[in-house]
Amino acid sequence: NETTEEKIQKLEEEIRKIKEDCEGFDEWKGFVEQFIDDPNSKNITFSLLRRDLPSPAVPKDWGERGSAPEISELVEFAKSLDNSYLAIQGPPGTGKTWTGARIIHHLVTVEKKKVGITAQAKAAIDNLLEETVKFTREEMKQNPEEVLNARRRYGDDPLEGVTQQRGKPSSFASEEALIVASTPWFWAHKEFNDDENLFDYLVIEEAGQLSLADALAASKGAKNIILLGDPQQLRQVNQASHPSGSGVDSGISILGHLLGEAPTMPDDRGVFLDKTWRLDPSICTFISEEFYDDRLKPAESIDRKIENRRNGLFWIPVPHEDEEPSVDENQKEAKKIAEIIASFMDGSKFIEDGVGRAMRIEDFMIVAPFNRQRKRIRETLQDDLGIDFSTADSIVGTVDKFQGRQAPVVLYSLTTSSYDSIPRGREEFLFLPNRFNVAVSRAQCMAFLIGSETLIDTRANSIPEMKALNHFCRYVYDPSLKSSQDFND
């Protein structure tokens, strides 16, 4: 065990590293004065702030053909950027990380460019790095260490194909083609004021979660920006209070800022990945119409089902106790979830592309809005299904745990008995469209919504609340979705 002195030394070292990373961070604020002095300056930071259209212009035929451009077209556009940006919105299962990895590989290995990767969360950075390394090794049959020259400036756990290397921007200035992955703080370093230290591209993963303020700061580190994300899924993790003025809210995400009021990427501003390889058509219809202006379509090649079951959406009403309404945990819903899972574990098969196998407990994903319900469901699964803690814990969580993941069957417990029972200050949270979108869109074959009818029949108190509730009401009551049909039919 570490001594107290050793722990203090480790903490002091971490503080030292943070201070080094943050050195000069406040200098980015100086761009405001520069912007006032020269508002038309051809600078990527100013371009993002002004919501300029990309330069060069996005090809008109991309929007006219009604489908997303090919990877080769995205690569050609990315390499032609002139102190500008390429914004890519990727709904659930459309492969935005897959797309980003292939763009990065080409820019580094063919164009010999210096490419940075950043995101709000280190896990998101690692995910994109790993996908790029995997593509390089498995599909391009190249040695990632040799052709990618990838460095990571944080963490102690090794990442295959990636070298750990800390250092200031100037330490990478003499190199030609490489990848450097780091948090947004690094890209705001004062040494990027020297053009010789600028990277050619900075790729921002999960750009729907990175605030405008942080994105503008990070944009100092590169000549061009590539944005990957989806504002219709989980919002930025840290909802800090940022000053706003002249119609600009610096607390909004960078992708949200570029989209404005539009739920999907306008054709002249970027790319909307319109084909999902995850969602069954019956699930995709709901997700597309409710959250993506009916632009999202299922890939024709999707061939997944559970033997003798109907794919789609299912509503499972559970009566709650009027005398003791539930707030943030409900045993009846937990028991119902265990019953549903048990009904699949009796020899049912998951069939994909004509090949069947027995259903496994890992084929289920259970989403809960509150940690107390997450714990309740986990314990119920252990007791009723006889599974161990680790397994139960791996398949139960809040939507934050499951973004980017998928499962054949998803079960979403609403937990709370009625609107009056919602914990104070969490009214908007429970019905937040982004979280509902993420919960349902994890499902490849079947999505179950489990809850109290009284909660669904809530009377809205505001227009935003009414819009949010409409998603749930349509899920439950629209006969075309067949959600009330027995799931064994």
Image (tube, rainbow, N blue to C red):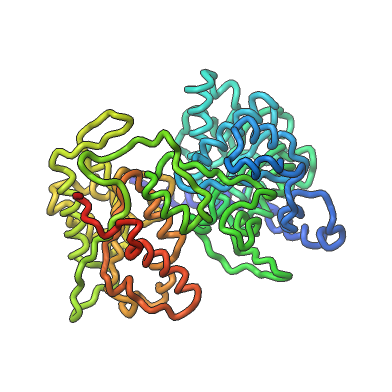
Q: Is residue 50 above or below residue 106?
A: below
- Please tell me in which quadrant of the rendered image residue 31 appears: bottom right
For the question of whether residue 414 can be seen, the reply is yes
- Work out which residue is located at the far right of the displayed protein and give it: 37
Q: Going 74% across and 30% down the picture, which residue do you hit?
A: 174
Q: Going 79% across and 41% down the picture, which residue do you hit?
A: 195
- Quarter of the image with the N terminus is top left
**Residue 412 in picture, x, y percent from top left:** 31, 58
**Residue 224 in picture, x, y percent from top left:** 71, 42
**Residue 233 in picture, x, y percent from top left:** 48, 55
Q: Is residue 106 above or below residue 49?
A: above
- Work out which residue is located at the far front of the displayed protein and give it: 480
- Comparing 248 with 193, the one in front is 248
Determine whether, in the image, residue 271 is placed left or right of residue 478: right
Q: How many marks?
A: 0
Q: Is residue 16 above or below residue 167?
A: below
Determine whether, in the image, residue 383 is placed left or right of residue 278: left
Determine whether, in the image, residue 342 is placed left or right of residue 465: left
Q: Going 52% across and 39% down the picture, which residue do you hit?
A: 97
- Please tell me in which quadrant of the rendered image residue 478 appears: bottom left
For the question of whether residue 369 can be seen, the reply is no
Q: Going 81% across and 59% down the picture, which residue do you hit?
A: 35
Determine whether, in the image, residue 160 is placed left or right of residue 352: right
**Residue 149 in picture, x, y percent from top left:** 60, 27
- Comparing 3 with 421, the one in front is 421
